[in-house]
Amino acid sequence: MSQKPHIDRESGRHLFKQMLRIRRFEAKCAELYQAQKIRGFLHLYDGEEAVALGVMQALEDRDAVVATYRDHGHAIARGLPMATLMAEMYGKMEGCSRGRGGSMHFFDRARRFYGGNAIVGGGLPLAIGIAMADKQLRPGAVTACFFGEGAAGEGAFHESINLAELWDLPVLFVCENNLYAMGMPLELAEAETNISRKAAAYRTPNEAVDGMNPIAVEAAARRAVDSIRGGNGPYFLECRTYRFRAHSMFDAQLYRTREEIELWKERDPLPRMQKWLEETHMLSPQELRGIEADVEAEIGKAVAFAEQGQWEKIEELERFVLVDEVPE
Amino acid sequence: MPSLGADMESGRLVQWLVKPGSVVKKGDVVAVVETHKGAFEIEIFEEGVVSELCAKEGEELPVGAPLARLTRPGEQSVPKAPKAAPEAIPVSVPLAVEVGRAPGTQAAPLASFVQPSSRPRASPAARRRAGELGIDLNTLKGTGFDGSVTLADVELAAAGGAPPKDPSSAAAPATRRRGFDPNEMRLAIAAAMSRSKREIPHYYLASTIDMSRPLAWLESFNRQRKPEERLLPAALLLKATALALREYPQLNGFWEDGRFRPADGVHIGWAISLRGGGLIAPAIHEVDKHSLQSLMGALRDLVGRARSGGIRGSEMMDPTFTVTSVGDRGAESVLGVIYPPQVAIMGFGRVIERPWIVDGQVTARSLIIASLAADHRASDGHLGGLFLSAVDRFLQEPEGL
Amino acid sequence: MKELAANASTNRMTYREACRQAIREALIDDPRTLLMGEDVGLYGGCYAVSKGLLAEFGPQRIRDTPLAEATFVGAGIGAAMAGLRPIVEIMTCNFSLLALDQIMNNAATIPHMSGGQFAVPLVIRMATGAGRQLAAQHSHSLEGWFAHIPGLKVLAPGTIEDARFMLKAALADPNPVIIFEHIVLYNAEGDLDPDVTSVDIAKARIRRHGRDISILTYGNSLPKSLAAAEVLAAEGIEAEVVDLRVLRPLDNATLFESVARTRRCIVVDEGWKSGSISAEIAARLSEDQFFELDAPIRRICSREIPVPYAAHMEEAALPQTPQIVDAARSLVKPR
Amino acid sequence: MTEAEVRQLVCDILSDIAPETDPAMLSGGRDIREGLDIDSMDFLNFIIAMSKRAGVAIPEEDYPKLFTIDGVVAYLTSSVQPQGTRSS
């Protein structure tokens, strides 16, 4: 169990840069939301970046991803271009869902990204089906299914883990346990607050991991994926994490204290990673500035791309309600 | 007792079509009143429940005398209302179509949600077809669902074969008369025309209009069409007059209280002479807005109803101008007498064939003499002349009518 | 080895057998197809539609699921998105409510919301309707509810032929298709035209021609309407019976053409009247065909009650032939 | 259509158009427009009804042939015969 991943200069800086991309991208989203460029619900991932990133590190192109409505981090870590994500939030045709989904519904067929799903627990059954298909059509492929701890209250959570285990399906269940289902604290919602134990009840291999540490998450995810690819059926990974920002943009956070947030911020993966890289001389101040400049430039381009994007014609409103063929 | 004309002083209630407890809506026909001009259906302009019938059938009453009392929606019924009223309210039975329906004909049970309606009950298909043909649904007896007029009823009527709504059917007492009493009418015409000649300083103008072009157009128009779609010259004359009136609104209106009041629409009274003597001039509404074909339909309908006595009181009250046309067997010209309080009347003579000079050549042409009699208090001869020219101008472009 | 020869020689079969043959054919034709649902395997299907298929196709193709409608329907959706062509059976449509979230929020939504990147070529079969004394929780007709949802196609086979061939067309369709099989029809028996090997899932069908009134119906109300037409014919009223077949998208053209011709119409629908497919049809007719109508549109629907158990009560709750006859009479020959 | 049927039809239609009159009293050669005081509008209604009920097309130029009942009889018995009645 102690297969500590080897972090070299390159992979360390890669992890840091990816988390920074997510963090800075979302800071921009918050700004653009207040400037009314982005509308609808906007759920930010600040604090949880290590989860998406660590899991995606363990996945391959052939694998599938089912995300939640807090899907910016999943999409960026999965490699969806920032520009198409920003365009999506602008509601532009160049967006990754043609401007039809917005922040909560990023889709990308090419990257097997099966959508941000805005029904809590709604993505788990989909993951079961994708894994069924993969088992027959793409042996070895894994479906990573993200959901929050709030999903544990839904019947679909239990039904899905049971079915995956029952049918030996290649599903990686990733529970992003950030302690609050919107404003509902875990201990007020669940009689058993140890989520991974629920998976154990279905005999599914499971593990709880520090979701504030990308290296730990990646290590756990690799163990999980190896197990799944080894034909051992599903795997349940509980990542204990915390979101620093409110649930969505319009949330007064009455349900938790500032002190609690500050306490968790001490475990913020970004400064910790940066500090560690600097201390181990894997990141010079100049390199840091370079990374930051790269990220800012990428975000700038994404915003410009979104600004220049086209609005879908209203005549297209009914297009794809029914489709003419199954896309290949 | 409503006033149906300036010259009406009293009327005799012939028949009640409602009874205490009847629910009535604006536009419902509630009674038949006989006047010196004949029998008229009396419409109601309020809604509510009839609480008391003040007049008895056969009673003669002065204009203004109450015929019935009405309780408005939400009001308490007056104490005199018969006790049986509540269960007598036939919510599912529209008052307007009760006429002509056999007693005991029951509304089908499915119809229980149908609200009373002032309109004749007719299916949408029938309504559309009747509109196209210019047939008044009031004149038809429905054979369809819940006594409604169906498409087949309309088409049968258009073919001339429909039994019109029969006033002497079992539902209506035999005493009810729908025709015009020639003696009464003579008196009415005498009163109105005397008043006209006494009060109105008429001036008269006449122009001869070359009808060759409009008639040729009419012939080719009619050639491609079935009889029921064909036009008569009257439709052209009427429409041209209406369009000219739009240009000269000073002739379209009323002289009242010492001043001219323009009308708010071009509602032309069309003079219809009745067999056995007499004349009525009920209104065709918004003539300027009709197409020629719908105007033709309206004309046919109006003449048909004038023959059968189905003219509504309001139609007699509405004209804002009158046209009299002698038709194809009349005199060469006619100079009308204005129907007060209107301020003008247009007269068209018979179409005559006469030598006429066109481009310096004498040729045979079809001519019509158009005349205008107008109230000199409201307008002057110059304007009248311009109006006649306008009528001519519109007639020369029949395709634009 | 797996051939349709077993029953191909005889053209007479029950609706149930037709459904089974349709599934067999699909499983033989396409290795991506599987049947999944509660008791479809060992038990042979609640209504015995899939009896014998487990033995023939094995547990990978005939999958018994736990009692977890949300998940096995959702799994069908995911599997369809990822390349399979699943047939999901929901035992009876009342259980479909447990899967409604998946059907509405995922199956019907994702193709459009993903900008056309993903399709959901899934078929969901469910048993529907009343008439077997199954009481209030097993006697629903929820076709109208599903027909409300953009992104779905909703089919209602009312004949042996449609039961036999609609599935093939549904599986060939790239969209999620729901097939409602009426429980009373499963035992209905009829002859298949040997020349017919497929049906469309786009058009309504005129099952009986007539000039006086159009009876628009589907499912188990179809035989009731045809019976009513027989009675009416004896009285000189020629009723046209139109089988809707496809409840979403509705085939306006066929319905409008029929009603514009007969000018009178009755909609017979086993669903409740309020907010039903019959309401939708009546509304469309009055919106678009108002001036063609020669009589008010009538609807014969189930009484607005939870369907009771006792036979006489259940019968009284459902549309029946005499009501259709009476309504037609009142519209065509009012006196 | 027999002559008697045509005469009956003409009388029926005229009775509808001019209810106050008795067309049966009219001699066959009399101009019905004068005899019954029929104006052009009434006459058109007469043509419409005649055309529909006898199922014949009556072009406008034929109107003068229909000014008398005898004329109508001659017109219809000749034109109806080859054309046949229109079934509804």
Image (tube, helix red, strand yellow):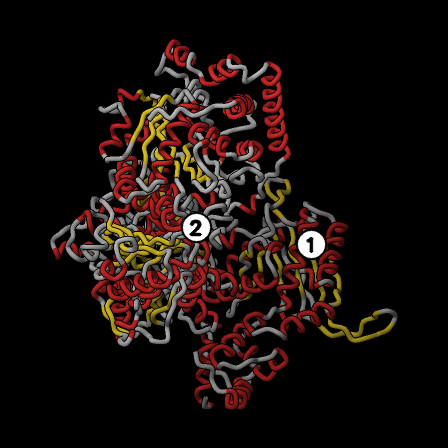
Q: Which mark is residue B244?
A: 1
Amino acid type for the residue under numbered disc 2: Ser
Q: Which residue is denoted by mark 2 in the rendering?
A: B10
Residue B212 point in image, percent of width and height: 74, 70
Query: Of marks 1 and 2, which one's residue comes earlier in the chain?
Result: 2
Q: Residues within 10 Å of mark 2 (few under 14, many from 20)?
A: many
Residue drawn where x is 49% and y is 83% of the image:
D26
In this view, the residue in front, C171 or A136, is: A136
Does residue C284 sit above or below D32 in this rendering? above
Residue A59 point in image, percent of width and height: 44, 35
- Indicate left or right for B289 with C197 as reference: right
- Looking at the image, can residue C266 be seen? no
- Indicate left or right for A4 with C49 as reference: right
Residue B295 point in image, percent of width and height: 58, 61
1 vs 2, front mark: 1
Residue B373 point in image, percent of width and height: 68, 55
